[in-house]
Image (cartoon, helix red, strand yellow):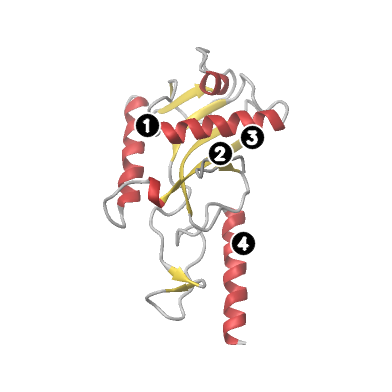
Amino acid sequence: MPRRRGDERGVGGGAVARERDERTGPQLRVREQRGRGVGRARGVREAGAREGGPLAGIGFQEEIERRAFDRGGGGYGVPAANLLAFVRGKALPPSPGRLLAPRVAPDDLRGILPGAVEDDIRFGLLRFGGAMRGFLTREATLYAVESRTSSPVRIERVNYESVTHKGLYPVGEGAGHAGGIVSSAVDGIRAALRILETYS
């Protein structure tokens, strides 16, 4: 998971186990011309989100989704940008080839996500492109936004057990403790091991 030095905000994506205290946040999805999709997510930590109680994450998601809806022209159009245009700040036409959505609105995607999130996604994409030859191509398209990679509400737990309901072990994405298939599986395995340890 690429990270900026001296910065606690993570840039992740793919099958990566997330840190326990990191929530998965807004995501931009990359799809190549041949139709293979690759997701990139940037986590939003609880302290960096906003005030407003335990459901503040839902308001945060709705605000981002509203911006994307408006930029898509309403009617469920999807704002989309050429990958190189997004990461390098160039004015490039939309990528050629098959599009992911039935109706796409060409857009530079700037301002849909909070600035820090956008900067971190750009940093992560450039870093990933440096490690994986051919990833950064003008044939790739970014679509904004997939903001529901995980639950915006986290069920509190201690040693994997709910703090309010003894014997309940909230795990995975729905409980707010994972951000993908692999991290959900890891969380579930760790919880199962904890249960075996407790009741053996």
Instruction: Give residue 79's quadrant in the image.
Output: top left
Q: Where is residue 149 in the image (x, y as percent from the top left)?
A: 48, 48
* Residue picked out by circle 4: 186
Which residue type does callout 2 highlight?
Arg
Q: Distance between the residues labelled 2 and 4?
A: 19 Å
Residue farthest to the bottom?
200
At a point 43% along the width and 25% down the height, the residue shown is: 109
Q: Mark 2 highlights which residue?
A: 40
Neighbourhood count class around disc 2 (C-alpha, 10 Å): few under 14, some 14–19, many 20 upward: some
| Crowding at mark 3 (Cα within 10 Å: few <14, some 14-19, many 20+) | few
Given the image, on which type of amino acid does mark 1 rest? Ala
Gap between marks 3 and 2 measured at Cα: 13 Å
Which of disc 2 and disc 1 is earlier in sequence? 2
Write down the residue under mark 1. Answer: 68
Across and down, in percent, residue 186 comes to 62, 62
Report helix, strand or loop for mark 1. Answer: helix
